[in-house]
Each structure stands twice: as structure tokens, then as C-alpha cells.
Image (cartoon, rainbow, N blue to C red):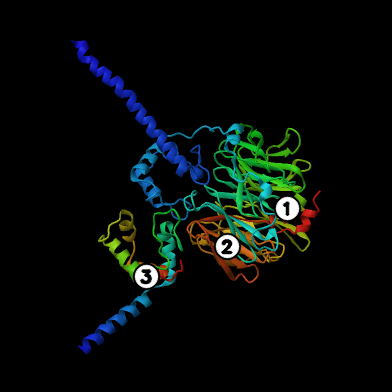
Amino acid sequence: MKITKSLPLSVLTALLLPLANFAIADEGQKMHQLYEDNCASCHGSDHGGYLAPALNADTLKGRSPTALRTIVMAGSFDTLMPPFYGKLTDDEIRGVIKHLQNTPKLPNPPFTIDDMKASLKVYVADESKLPSKPAYAIDNMDDVIGVAARGKYGRGEGSRAIFINSKTHQKIGEVPTGTAAHIIDYNPANPRWAYVKTDTAEIFKVDLYSMQAVRSIKTGWNGPGMGVSRDGKYIMAGSFVPHNAVILNADTLEPLKTFELEGIDPDGKQVSSDSGMIIGTPFDDIFAIALENAGQVWVVDLKDGFPVTRITDVGHHLHDAFLTHGGRKLMIASYDDSIVAAIDLKDRKIIKKLAAGCVPHVGGGSAVVVDGRTLGFGTNFGDCDKTVVSVWDLDKMEVVKQIPVSGGTESPAAHANAPYVAVDIISKDRRARTVQLIDKKTLEVAKTLDVGGHAYFPEYSADGKFLYVSAGYSGDEVVVYDSTSLEKVASISMESPAGIFSHGRVRYMTRGLSPDEIKGAN
Amino acid sequence: MKRLLLSGLLTLCFATADNVSAAVIYAGQARAAAVCSQCHGIKNPSAEAPFPPLAGRDEAYLQTALKQYRDKTRKSDIMNAIAGSLSDADIANVAAYYAKLKP
């Protein structure tokens, strides 16, 4: 009797428990997918943070779910965090917050060469049928300027690479990228090809003549690093998640070799590392890649087996860099040491470490020739009291001046024909609307432009006559100024514009140098 | 009758004059950037956003709508909360700013 009585109960329990477990697992999976589809492109697929803060059980410990819900619903002012009100339901927002507060940072989720191969998409099968010249009026392909429009939500319809004729300031093409475009590179050997990398590590090969993507490949979960070799035959891409890099055939986008990014950091610890900047140089058939956490720069030779030379102890938390001297010297920023290290890519060793303000972010850097000296300009986040732009003599490798500016800075723009070096002020208040202009000769701030939005990523047109600036975040336009008079001449509307990349960069290598500089390269 | 019309007209004129002098476009711009643009954008909201565009909308309509949201005669969780933080001057400034923008 007892048995018969208890039997149904145990059967019921046996039946219900797995169901309940299944429901929980299912809910977790659903919330993970929701996170991947809405949040991970900025906050990191491993929950470890990327452009935006890390969201996991550790970082969100003790945070009020109600306060977090408000941020998700209404967005966060003067950041890229959009309001998800009306995009996600209240239940979804509550669910994802609960999920995040219970999920640890994931340990380097894999993305293998086979995953990459499987992700290769071909949009135009026969490239020989593409037009042989631009399908729009343009004097010179160097006049093309590409803007990485992030889109309000970091994905969707608004996420595009938008190309503009920098003489007429008219849009000449838009290529949808699915998630936020981050970096645009151009093929140095053939002006028709551009490469666009998104925050979710897809690379699009874009035909600038017909303004369409012809192929794409996903190279990881997150990470902006990308470079193109001087012969235009290879692309190297690196990820934050997972910790690897890959060399692709620039023509087919097929992956050729992957590299696990790990090494001994300046403190003697073996670490696995995010990929920082990757750069090709007109100086040699090589790529240089920064291993952020390992504090190393690797030089990869573009020959059989792609051998690697490791330059160690460059600095703590490396990030971005720029080239000088015909592409032989690399100036690379170390966030945590607040220095820029000069590296000789021929001898493959550190030349010198130079003071660089506070948390240097050189953002592509600038180099200009003034009165016979080649001066490098370096921006920095300025998370301490020191808000300066550093100027270095790139022959003597010494600090010339630290120019006081009104806040932290992220990217300097210069051009051989323009009188000012433009730096974007990023401090989180009204100053974020502005760009400051440093007179090349006096090395002092000559003018402040109130651009609007969150003004960042200044870039000169290839002829140096116009200065383009993204009024990002909610600004939703790119604003164009005359480089000399600094009068506003045009506004180009788009969703959350960020990085601006002139096609002219392939000719002058580093912004501010004359195209002759590159001719001096090997 | 005539008198009534005249005084009515006068009131109207005063009201209009009052609005013009009260609305400060620059203050509206600052307030819009800080409060409204996060969702509605400046010239346009995101193609995928569920929020209506404000640029070029009728000034009086924008004012009325904001005041209704503020006194909760028009219901919306999020707009009732946001409009609640705006003063009469804020509302006049923001409405004047958005009304003058070309979408």
C-alpha cells in the first residue's frame, strides 16, 4: 500500500525534475542567445568586456537589478549604450540581467580555423564581371573616405560602412555590415578593394567600384585588429575573443594560418593575450601585431610557414601604433606604462621608450614634417590630471613637448597640406562635443571646434583641404570643415558614425606625412 | 463684440510673443542632447528604433505632448518619467529647437 501510494509521487518527481532542469537550462540558453544577439558585440562574447564594461557575476556583484534594468531600458548618457526600451520586453530585460548576474566570465571560448572556413560567404562569385572602373564620378580613388557607421544598436540596418567622395562630400556607397563596422583598410596594390572589419570580427571584402561586399568571413567572436600587407596579398586579423590571430588570403579571404596569442609578459608571467593593433608596412613583407596582455610585438614574415619574431618586454597593456621613417619604425602605445615604445622593424628590437602623457591611445597616430624635423603626435585618454598631447622628434626619438589640451584624447589627424593637427576631446561632459586644433608650427592649441554629438575620429581628405569629424553617439552626422578657415562646409547624416578612414592613407602611410615619404621605403 | 475680438487677438499676440522670447534654441539644443536624443536622435532616430522622430515637428504639438506626458494625462512609462524632469522653460526650449530642425 505504501508503495502504491508513494509510487505516483516518485514517478511524478522523476518526471517533473528533469522537466524543471530542462526549463532552467532552456531559459539560460535563451538568455545567453539574447546576450549574444544584443549585447556581446560591445560587452564581449566571453562576458569579459570589450568596448563596453564586462558583464558577469563578478563585475555585477551587489548591483541592484532595478538600477541595471533602468540602464538597459533607457540607455546610458554620453556612451554608446542605446535604450533597449521597445526592443526587448520587460521580461527579457529582467531575464538577461538575472542571467548576467549568475554567469562567470567565460574562459576564452574557441573559434578555430575550421569555424572561420565554415563562415566564409561569397556574395559575388565571378569577380571578373565587376565593372572595371568606378560606377560613380570621382577624380581619384584616394578621394574616397570611408566611415564606420556603428548603428544605434551596434547592429542591424544602421550598421554600415559608408563611403563618401571627399571633394563633393556626397555619399557614393553604403555597405551593410550586420554589426558595427569598426575598421576600414584599403588594398595598397589595387585601389578597388577595401576591407571592413566589424566588432564581431567579420571581415568584408568590398569592391569600391561597384560599392558592394563580394565576400566575408568571421575571424573570431570580437576584436578590431586588422592589417593589409604592402603587396595587397594578405590580411592579418586578430581577436580579443578568443586570443588568436589569423592570416587570410586577401583575394579569397580564405584563412591560411592561425596564431595562438600567448607569451611571457613584462612581469615574467606566461599569459594568454588579446590581439592589439595589426599593421602592414610599405617597408617590408611583414605584419606587426601587438599582444596586449603579453606586452609583446610579433613580427610575422610573409613567407613559407609565416615565421614569427617575438619582441618582448615592450610594455604593459599594449594597444595601438603608427609607422614612421618609410615604415621602418613602429611607435606603439602602452596603456599601463604611459609610454610609447619605438620599435625598429628591421633590427626587430626596441629603440627607446618615450613619455606619452597618461594612458596613451595613439589611434593611428600622426607624423608631420615641420622645419626639417619629423614630429610624431600622440593622443591619450588622460585618465589622470595630465591631459596633454605628446609630440616626439621621430629622428632623435625624444619628447619635444607635451601640449596641454582641454581633456582626454583618442585620435590625432594631420595632413601634409593642412595647418593644424586635430585631436578629439573625449572627456565625458560638454567637452566631448569638441575637437581641438593644434598649430603645427607653434605647437599650441589654436582653436576649438564645437562639432556636436560625441565628436571623435577626425580625418583629413586626401588632398588635405577638408577635415572630417564624426559627431558620434546620438549626433548621427559626419561634419566637414574647411581645413584652413575651419568653416563648416557640409554635414552627412548617418547612424552613430565612428572611425573615419581616408583612402589616401595607403599613399602617405601615416597621417600627416607626404606621399614622398612612402617612396623612400625599401 | 469688436472689443472682445481685439482683446482676444491681443492675448494671442502676447502669448505668441511670450513663447518666442521664452524659447531659447541653444538651451533647447543642450537639453535635447542631454535628455531626448538618446532615444529620438537629433535629426532622426535609428531606422530600427521604436521611437518617433522629433525634428521638424510642430512646435505647439511637441509642447502639448510633453506637458501631457508630464501631468500623466497621456500614459507612457518611460515618457511620464522623462517629461516629469522637465520645467515649462525646458519644454518650450526643446520644442522650439526640434521644430526648427530639418529632418
Callout 3: SS: loop
State the separation of the CA atoms marked 2 and 1.
26 Å
Chain bearing mark 3: B
Placement of A95 over or under A399, stated as above or below: above
Numbered badge on residue B86: none
Residue highlighted by disc 1: A398
Farthest residue to the left: give it.
Answer: A1
Reply above or below: A7 against A105.
Answer: above
For label 2, the residue is A435
Q: How crowded is mark 2: few (under 14 residues within 10 Å), some or many (20 or more)?
A: many
Can residue A160 be seen here? The reply is yes
* Whether residue B101 is situated above or below residue A361 in the rendered picture: below
Q: Which amino acid does label 2 sit on?
A: Val
How far across and down, in percent of the image, does residue A314 sit?
A: 68, 41
Q: How many residues crowd mark 1 within 10 Å: few (<14), some (14–19), many (20+)?
A: some
Chain for disc number 2: A
